[in-house]
Amino acid sequence: MSNIVRKCHLLHVCCAPDLVISYLAGARGDLFFYNPNIHPQQEYEKRLNEVLRLAKLWDLDIISVEYEPSDFFERLAGSEAGIEAEPEGGKRCEICFRLRLEKCAEVVKKSGYASFSTTLTASPKKNVQLINNFGIEVSEDTGTMYLPNIYRKSILYNDAQKLINQLGIYRQGYCGCAFSISTPY
Ligand code: SF4
């Protein structure tokens, strides 16, 4: 019999509001905050601190990594010219989703988690089918297990909005990267 103890689920978290929606939709497991797309650093820390607040409130373990915006910019630099100017939802976002899912799968594999998913699918503004397709592709490439979901379809979505307000959770005014600051929500 193997001595390897498999950990349960790893939930990639993009921001606190989407974590609340996902949590009320039933998402559980250890949290993984990896979002090198967020700009500037103060905004990154603000979003991370809100996620840390929820992790403490719900007694969830969290893995967070150093702020490494170069991860994001290097990916963009290795892509086609002009990708920075893509509209939100375009090819730049595909790279952004994939980068975060790939890093999550890396941790899943290294630490022996059974599966992973992402709170990105809680966002009403994102192409969740595309995110789930990337999650499946990444899991196939890495020998991990991605659990497709659409957390924003939760029947408790409206309750989640109320809870976000009750807890005074910071709601970001733009998606995250430097190129999205000029397209506020
Ligand atoms: S708009 Fe959002 S999803 Fe798209 S690249 Fe920027 S941070 Fe990533």
Image: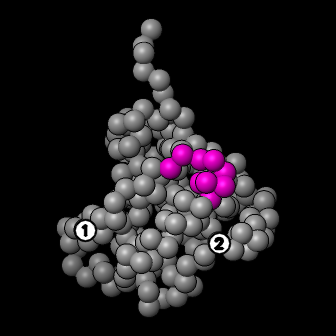
Q: Is residue 152 magenta?
A: no
Q: Provide residue 103's location: percent of width, then percent of height.
A: 36, 51
- Per the rendered image, the range of residues in magenta is 54-62
Q: Provide residue 123's location: percent of width, then percent of height.
A: 60, 68
Residue lying farthest bottom? 182
Q: Is residue 58 magenta?
A: yes
- Vertical comparison of 30 with 150: above or below: above
- Kind of residue at disc 2: Ile
- Ligand 1 near label 2 (Cβ, under 8 Å)? no
Find disc 2 in the rendering and name its residue.
169
Q: What colour scheme does the image use?
A: one colour
Question: Residue at left 35%, top 44%?
Answer: 106
Relative placement, left or right, of 25 versus 113 is: right
Relative placement, left or right, of 63 versus 22 is: left
Find disc 1 in the rendering and name its residue.
70
| Residue density around tag 1, few if under 14, some if 14–19, many if 20 or more, within 10 Å | few
- Kind of residue at disc 1: Ser
- Vertical comparison of 35 with 56: above or below: below
Question: Residue at left 39%, top 35%?
Answer: 111
- Vertical comparison of 110 with 50: above or below: above
> In which quadrant is the C terminus drawn?
bottom right
Q: Is residue 178 visible?
A: yes
| Residue density around tag 2, few if under 14, some if 14–19, many if 20 or more, within 10 Å | some
Residue 17, picture quadrant: bottom right
Q: Provide residue 43's location: percent of width, then percent of height.
A: 45, 77
> In which quadrant is the N terminus drawn?
top left
